[in-house]
Structures are given as C-alpha cells and as structure tokens.
Image: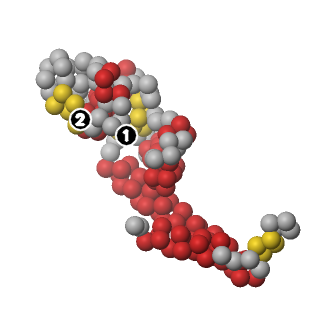
Amino acid sequence: MISWLKRLRRLQKSLSRKKYDKETHTGSKNWEKAKQKVAAEHRKIANQRKDFQHKLSRRIVDRCSVFCCEDLNIRGMVKNRRLAKEISSASWGQFLTMVKYKMERQGKHFIQVSRWFPSSQTCSRCGFQNTVVKDLVIRSWKCPKCGTYHNRDVNAKNNILAEGIRLLQKNGIIVTV
C-alpha cells in the first residue's frame, strides 16, 4: 500500500479512538491534536499531488505544441465505487485545467474530443465501430471487418489523436505528424 495512505489511515484510526461528544460537538484536547494531524496529512497529500501535476503539465507543455484529450465525465465516473478513490486521488480535472491554461499561455493548442466520440469502440485502422466492446471489462478486441487486433487503451489513444488532428484541420490549422 502507498505510504501516505498508510499514514493517513493510522492517523484517522487514532482520531476515531479519541473522546468526542456527539451532542455538544466537542472533543478532548487529544482529539483536537489528532484532528489537526489528520488535517495536516491531508494538506501534505494535496500539496504533493499539486506539485506532481504542475511538474508533469509543465513537461507536457514544453514538449508539445498540441495536446489532445477526451472530455471525460469525471463527476459521473466518481459515482462508480470501484474507481472513485483512484479517480479522485489522481485529480484528472485539476490536471487538465493546469495543462489547458499553460498551453493557452504559450499560444499552443489544447483540444478536447467530445465524450460521446466512440474512441475505444472504433477501429483505428478501418474505422469500423464495434459496439460490442462498450463494456470496460473488455481490454482487447479484434476488428470483425479488417481483422486487426486492438488493445483498448492504445486504440482509443490513436482515435483521439486522429480526431484531434481532424478538429485542428477543421479550424484551418495545418498539421504535420
């Protein structure tokens, strides 16, 4: 398990063992101290996440002139109890916001492909849309039309890139790959 997660769990466990009166909403001095430790740990984790995201977004902006990504329904994805913790701890929305404003400051292009674009269902070679692979459990599939074997994530990346290039060309920007 990740070290910060272990630390946070230990501190929260310690906090829950301290005296707290639910009627008056007051706790003992040790409860107050434990509460401050938990808050400090949350602050530390948030600062580490922001630092990593700033460094990664800066590296992306320095290396790329165009950034294409999918406009994901993050709020809806967090409702899935199996994925919620990982999605929330990654802060995708905050990261994309950082990349976007840094790209715009330098006059570079930030493209978001519509969330309704079937990036993982479309064959990146022939364009056939396979609706059978909608389920996230299916990680790889074979195109029934051209016979190409696809990894779901790599195929989605290729389709998002192609759609981003198409959107740039639609706006009159010349693209060379």
Regarding residue 135, the answer to whether it shows in the image is yes
Quadrant for residue 176, please give it: top left
Left or right of residue 10, residue 174 in this image: left
Along the line of sight, the residue nearer the viewer: 39 or 67? 39
Along the line of sight, the residue nearer the viewer: 70 or 56? 70
In what quadrant of the picture does the C terminus appear?
A: top left
* Numbered-mark total: 2
Give the crowd class for mark 2: few <14, some 14-19, many >=20 residues within 10 Å. some
Measured as percent of width and height from the top left, residue 112 is found at: 43, 33
Pick out the residue farthest to the left.
147
Quadrant for residue 145, please give it: top left
Left or right of residue 27, residue 135 in this image: left
Measured as percent of width and height from the top left, residue 4 is found at: 47, 70
Mark linked to residue 143: none
Q: Residue at x 59, y 72 (%)?
A: 13
Q: Which residue is mark 1?
A: 67
Left or right of residue 149, residue 164 in this image: right
Q: Earlier in the sequence, mark 2 or mark 1?
A: 1
Establish if 34 lies above or below 159.
below
Q: Which residue is mark 2?
A: 140
Q: Residue at x 50, y 73 (%)?
A: 7
Measured as percent of width and height from the top left, residue 62 is found at: 35, 51
Amino acid type at circle 2 is Ser
Q: Residue at x 34, y 41 (%)?
A: 65
Q: Residue at x 45, y 29 (%)?
A: 115
Q: CA distance from mark 2 to mark 1?
A: 25 Å
Amino acid type at circle 1 is Phe
Q: Are marks 2 and 1 in contact (CB under 8 Å)?
A: no
Quadrant for residue 1, please give it: bottom left
Badge 1 element: strand
